Image (spheres, rainbow, N blue to C red):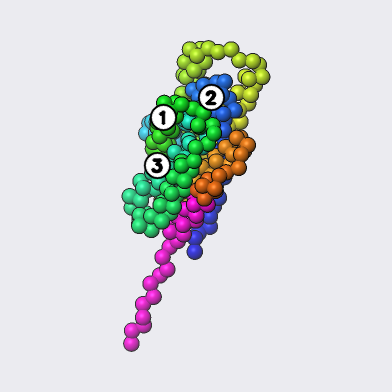
Amino acid sequence: MITRNTWLGIGCGAAAGALWGLVFVAPEATRDFTPFQLATARYTSYGLISIMLIAPRWRAIVATLGFAEWRALTWMSFVGNIVYFFLLGTGVHLGGVAMTSVVIGFLPVSVTLIGSRDQGAVPLRKLAPSLVLGTIGIICISIEAPPSVIERDETTRLIGVAAALGALVCWTAFAVANTRWLARVKHISSHDWNLLGGVVTGSLALVCITPAFLLAPATHASDDWMRFLATAAGIALAASIIGNMFWNMASRYLPLTLIGQMILFETLFALLYGFMWEQRLPTPLEVAAILLLITSVILCVSAHRPDPPAVHPETA
């Protein structure tokens, strides 16, 4: 039987994916602004919200942190938030929502492969069917070329793919490091660990405001600014505060070999939101890909069932 904590972790992973999927649509909703500007506004908002939420417990929490924890939070905030979202936004701008979600869809494979090397992890041979189906699903989507991508020239698309691949590397590193640090700082709740990351991320984002906005001046109507700021604040609250909270909870409930598969929920919801944004139905290949991704998650969960105890014949 799979434990109650495992099901809770899967539920938290699905909730995080549903909220994170929104970030793939945000760059399309704010195309008049650069990905760097959106990343800066989002993470400044993330920092401000985090400060307000953690303020009552700030002194008590900070007293338990050392240099190693702050260094880890700074590194993860920069790579997993600032750089990742900038590259993701660039991928969406230049390559489209579907292409970027496809590349990011390989996160389960990269994280699971790393997690399979941990002591006591589920053997890679048991995870192979899940990884193979997930990979085939991603390939099915990549074969399709949505209209939004066809309109871009080949060089632009290649730059978009490169940016998406960079985002994949950044978030793989973040996911692995974050899971391992959550196992080390058990005295800090997963929610407070996320808020600490928000404070650090917000501080880094403040440094980016000048190059993001003053060095890239552009004239925008007041309605455009309102839509931009509302989008940035909205994804900060939904994806960074609530989504990350669910993800950290899942990371404490699930091993790396299973938490990696939870990222497929982000891909599934990103595709769903992308279809809604582009006002089109998925193609047959995309439907097949979605079914393959769902089956991949189910097989991965099944692979984590504990083996039944061996039954030894009674000896006379």
> Residue 197: image x %, image y %?
48, 32
Q: Which residue corresponds to mark 2?
A: 38
In the rendered image, residue 236 lying in the magenta stretch gets the answer no
The amino acid at mark 3 is: Val
Is tag 2's residue or tag 3's residue first in the polypeptide sequence?
2
| Residue located at (56% from left, 29% from top) | 28
> Residue 90: image x %, image y %?
47, 27
Asked which quadrant contains residue 24, the reply is top right
Residue 240 visible from this viewpoint? no
Q: Which residue corresponds to mark 3?
A: 176
The amino acid at mark 2 is: Leu
108 left or right of 25 in image: left
| Residue located at (56% from left, 24% from top) | 31
**Mark 2 or mark 3: which is in front?**
2
Q: Is residue 91 above or below residue 178?
A: above
| Residue located at (40% from left, 39% from top) | 172
Res 158 label: 1
Residue range of the region highlighted in magenta in the rendering: 291-316
